[in-house]
Image (cartoon, grey):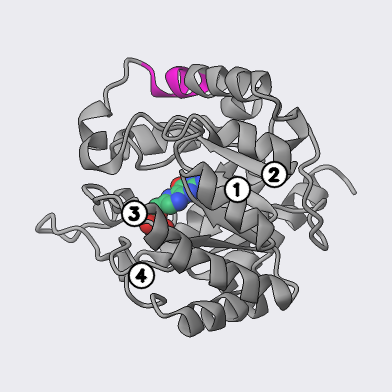
Amino acid sequence: MTSVPISVPGGAERCLVMGVVNVTPDSFSDGGMWFDEAAAVRHGLDLVQEGADIVDVGGESTRPGAARVSLEEELARVVPVIRALRSEGVVVSVDTMRAEVAKAAVEAGAQLVNDVSGGLADPEMPRVVAATGVAYVVMHWRGHSHDMDSRAVYADVVTEVREELSKRVDLVLAEGVSEEQIVLDPGLGFAKNAEHNWAVLAGIPRLAELGLPLLIGASRKRFLGRLLAGPDGTPRPFSRSDDATLAVTALAAHAGAWCVRVHEVGPNADAVRVAAAWKRAGAGT
Ligand code: PMM
């Protein structure tokens, strides 16, 4: 496997934990909570205290049905937060589909570009990422949030996600991104229903065969609420699906994920250490 250009203490021995700071009024599970700049920075620092290796700062909600924000608004939301977190020594990633935001974020200190569209939303993105040399999360994506549910059609989801990611990798490499920069993400919930998400999670070993580090973002997503629905079929609210997220983290880390993206950092930071100890013991080290 390649070695991502991010230096995190202990990162070589275990799955990393990426904590989420959504600087948005409308994200799925925490929209509005960290919309104010000072609150967002405080929250990012709290996540580091709880064990986050990376803090992912996003200014555009990708919840199903969400409308896009303007470039200016997105820049105004994320750049000051990234600069402030970086000045405190935090490893920051920027969650954006826009090349201009990625460029400004890296100038402000971001060390990873997390592009949920894998370079599809903004064709300039791979070239900008190539020029910066920072790590690049290429996520599986089939279209913007407003109509992604209609694209959740697969004959064999793991094979198709793998093939589509592989094509994205070829394209970003052709644009000058180096293999060491790339992290792949199957994009749970993005043009995928619950059944697809479970198949993708069970398929982590097959996705890992692409030879690149994998990031998994299951935290508080709707498929967990559906799994935990009450007897009348009402989905469990996301605010009560953190324990299920934790179970996914432990299993994904054990299956070889490089990083998990989560909202509730503390327990997930414990879970990746459990998975690492389990694997070490299994390997006889
Ligand atoms: N999910 C969301 C946002 N960004 N980034 C990556 N790499 N992977 C994901 O699964 C992902 C993401 C949506 O979740 P949120 O609105 O709760 O942050």
| Foreground label between 2 and 3 | 3
In the image, residue 188 lies at what x, y percent? 41, 41
Could you tell me which quadrant the N terminus lies in? top right
| Disc 4 C-beta below 8 A from ligand 1 | yes
How far apart are the alpha carbons under marks 3 and 1? 19 Å
Element type at mark 1: strand
Between disc 3 and disc 4, the foreground one is: 3
Q: Where is 24 relative to 196, above or below? A: below
Task: Considering the whole magenta stretch, tell me its main secondary structure.
Answer: helix
Kind of residue at disc 2: Ala
For disc 3, the neighbor class at 10 Å (few under 14, some 14 to 19, many from 20) is few
Q: Secondary structure at mark 2?
A: strand
**Looking at the picture, which amino acid does disc 4 mark?**
Asp
Of the image marks 4 and 2, the number of the one nearer the N terminus: 4
Ranked by sequence position, the earlier of labels 2 and 3 is: 3
Q: CA distance from mark 2 to mark 1?
A: 6 Å
Question: Element type at marker 3?
Answer: loop
Residue placed under numbered mark 3 in the picture: 70
Numbered range of the magenta stretch: 156-162
